Amino acid sequence: MVIKIFLTKIIKSLLIIFWSALLFCPNAYSDEFITGEELEWQSPIPRFQELGISPEHLVSLVSDKISLLVYPEKKLSIGNSGDKKTFKNARLVSAFTVIDAPVKKVRELIKNYDNYPNVMPRTEKATIIQKIGRHSLVEYLLVFKLPIMSLKIKYVFQYTEDKNGDISIRLREGTGEEGASRWEFIPLSNDRTLLVFTTWNNMENSGYFFKKIVKAQPGLKATIPEISATLAIDSIKKQFLKGRNSAKNKYQFIPELKIFNKPFNKKLPQIPVFNVEERKAIALLSEFGMTLVLHPKRNFKSNSEVITLEYISLINKDKTSVENHQGLLFDFDNYVDFLPQLDQIHHEKADTGFYTEWYFKYKFGILTLPVQFSLDYIWLDKNSLYFYLVDGDFESFYGSLCWYSINDDPLFQYTLAINIGNNLPFSLKVLSKLPRSSLLSGLFMGTSFVESQKQWIEINRK
């Protein structure tokens, strides 16, 4: 019973984390109206367009995908002169995609705030409680119905229509959190829009269990804004796919992997690859931070069953040679030094690559949740290493590590797709009840691995 209560508190905290990260505020509005003067503010969120990347260079990358740019931590201040707060380690994320609709229609959909129950998931009620000029205050009610509990969250935030056409968002009520975000609408043609959502949230004062979770799992600090931005942009994109023949893309089957043009002795799905134009776009983005690409869902027929895979690619600019990077990365004994959740790793070299057994311990206060799995790695060529799940607590786990250069800039790419399934131990099955649990797992494990190994390799590079 004690464990069940503790797990309930954990999942409640995680739901608040991920969904209030999208909409910032897990508390009810105080019913006090805000004056027009108080509503005036200068958003601290920088414009994506100010990076100087031509939108045309990004179209090939996101025409049917969603991409994220995760910026390095920076100093950020929010509020007016009298109540300004400064945060030294703010983590911003931009998500962007192509919408096949004119800018005007996309902006109208996002401005229709009281229609969000039909747009944003889990949103049951929306009420515009105040509107003055270009400012709107909106209260929303989210409802989560889970086997172990039912959770309701109320929040309020301010939308401001900027003179440049952007929509800025600011937290107005909460339990100590701060947050801001920005919508940008970039016309590609008369009927196509590059939609950008940049977000930041600080939730360090969100309560005891939140602090415990983030302290034990520091990778969540980056994952929270990633899922926040993804859910926002994905919800809008889906609205413009309604009524269209999108099923073909959603359920397209992934081809079977072939090694040296021959089927492997185990039926495995191919990993998505980027063409030259897409790699050039990734190289441009990598000048400003870590790039993530969320590939469309695809199906794969594995023996007699069909599984759905949602691949995520994470790409970082490499500051060392490929040979040095691979030498450090495949010294598996060092992984316990840079992956804080990793308890043990067993490995052996094989003719085609490597075999590894991973033993993780995820700590939440007094509770430790173990996760175990084993992976086979296969070299496809000298700069591409494929891996797949042999056994363990996940239903499926596929991915690859690869290295390539664009304009002499070396890039490291980690692609993965995880399905949690029913194999997890009881103590972790509750986490599978989180919305988009496979996507959350992929973002968390991918971000934790790429950022941790980058820091470690930069310290130990030759």
Image (cartoon, rainbow, N blue to C red):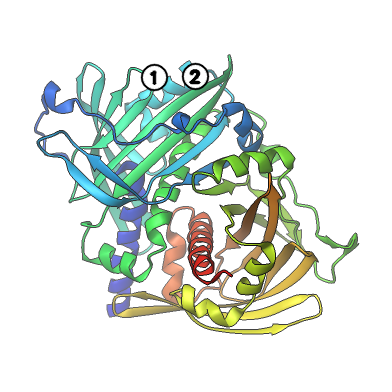
- Residue 117: where, in percent of width, then height? 37, 35
Mark 1, mark 2: which one is toward the viewer? 1
Look at label 1 and name its amino acid.
Gly
Q: Residue at x 43, y 27 (%)?
A: 184
Numbered tag placed on residue 165 in the rendering: 1
Q: Are marks 1 and 2 in contact (CB under 8 Å)?
A: yes
- Residue 85: where, in percent of width, then height? 18, 44
Q: Determine the secondary structure under disc 2.
A: helix
Q: Please state if 180 lies on the left or on the right of 297 as rendered.
A: left
Of 314 and 304, nearer the camera is 314
The answer to which image quadrant residue 8 occupies is: bottom left
Name of the residue lying farthest toward the top: 190
Q: Residue at x 69, y 51 (%)?
A: 405
Q: Please state if 302 lies on the left or on the right of 72 as rendered.
A: right
Relative vertical location of residue 430 with respect to residue 316 in this rendering, above or below: below
The answer to which image quadrant residue 211 occupies is: bottom left
Mark 2 burial class by Cα count in 10 Å: few <14, some 14-19, many 20+: many
Q: Please state if 217 lies on the left or on the right of 30 as rendered.
A: right
- Residue 277: where, in percent of width, then height? 70, 37
Of 236 and 362, nearer the camera is 362
Label whose residue precedes the other's in the sequence (1 or 2) = 2
Q: Residue at x 73, y 41 (%)?
A: 276
Mark 1 burial class by Cα count in 10 Å: few <14, some 14-19, many 20+: few
**Number of numbered markers:** 2
Q: Is residue 211 visible?
A: yes
- Residue 182: where, in percent of width, then height? 37, 33
Of 296 and 193, nearer the camera is 193
Numbered tag placed on residue 285 in the rendering: none
Tag 2 residue: 103
Q: Determine the secondary structure under disc 1.
A: loop
